[in-house]
Image (tube, helix red, strand yellow):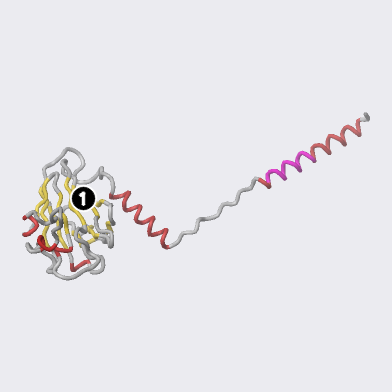
Amino acid sequence: PPPAMTTTTTMMMRAFVVSLLASMASGLVVTTQRPVVTQRRLLLDRRGSVKMIYGARNPTGPFAGNPVQVQWRVDAASDSVGAVPQHVSKLTSSGRGSIFLNKRYYSMPYYVLNSEEHKLSSANLYYDAPMIEQVQCKIKTRSNGDTGLLGIGGIAPTLVRSVRDGQWGDWDLVYKGQNRWLFSGDQISLDYNNPEAALFQVTE
C-alpha cells in the first residue's frame, strides 16, 4: 500500500489503543469510604484497647526479671468499706459453700502472697450498691510475684488508679475478664457510680 495509507492506519490504531486503555483505567478506579464510627463502636474499641494494654505481661514493670517474693497489703481507704462480717458467710452459703468461709476475710488489712488471690465483694461495703456483685474483682499474685487485678463483676467495671507525678491519675476501668497490673500505692474502687465511697489501697 502507499506510504500515506500505512501512516494513517498506524495512527488510527494507536489512538484506538490509547482510548481503550483509558476506558479500562477508569473502570478500575476504587473509591474508599471511611467506616462509620458510632458511640458503641468507640466504646468497644476503648474496652478492647484496655484489654490489650493490661491483659498481657508488663515487660517493663516493677516485677519484670527474676521472680520475687511479695506480700501485698490491702487496706480500707474510705469509711464505707471494711472486712466481711462473719454472719455473711451464713447468708451467702450455697450447696457448694460460701466464698467467705476463709477466716482471713473477717479482718483487715488483708494480705496476699505469691500464688494467692483475694476477692473484693459487695460484702465489703457498709451500704447498699446493687451494681456491685458478690465477687466484683480479684487481686491475683502469680508465683513469680506479678500481681494484678482481674475484673469479675459483669454489671459494672471495677476502677483502679495510680499516682502519677505526685497526683492521682485517671481511673482505669477494668471490665469482666480484663486484667490490670497493680503497683504499690494503687487504689481500687468497687463502686463505679461513687468511686470515693468504696476505696481500697494496696501496698507492697
Q: Which amino acid does label 1 sit on?
A: Gly
Image quadrant in which you'd find residue 197 = bottom left
Is 1 situated above or below 171? above
The residue positioned 18% from the left and 49% from the top of the image is 140
Is residue 76 rendered to the left or right of residue 23?
Answer: left
Relative to the observer, which residue lies in front, 21 or 36? 36
Residue pictured at 61% horizontal, 48% vertical: 30
Please state which of residues 201 and 129 is positioned toward the viewer in this rendering. Answer: 129
Dot 1, how many residues are within 10 Å of its Cα: few (below 14), some (14-19), or many (20+)? many
**The stretch drawn in magenta includes residue 18:** yes
Disc 1, SS: strand
User: For the stretch drawn in magenta, what is the main secondary structure?
Assistant: helix
Q: For mark 1, what is the residue?
A: 148
Residue 38 lies in quadrant = bottom left
**In the rendering, at what x and y percent does residue 32 appear?**
56, 52
Tell me the magenta residue range: 16-25
**Is residue 80 part of the magenta span, yes or no?**
no
Q: Which residue is drawn at 25% across and 52% down?
A: 180
Q: Position of residue 88 (x, y in %)?
A: 11, 63
Q: Position of residue 133 (x, y in %)?
A: 22, 62
Which residue sits furthest front? 95
- Figure label count: 1
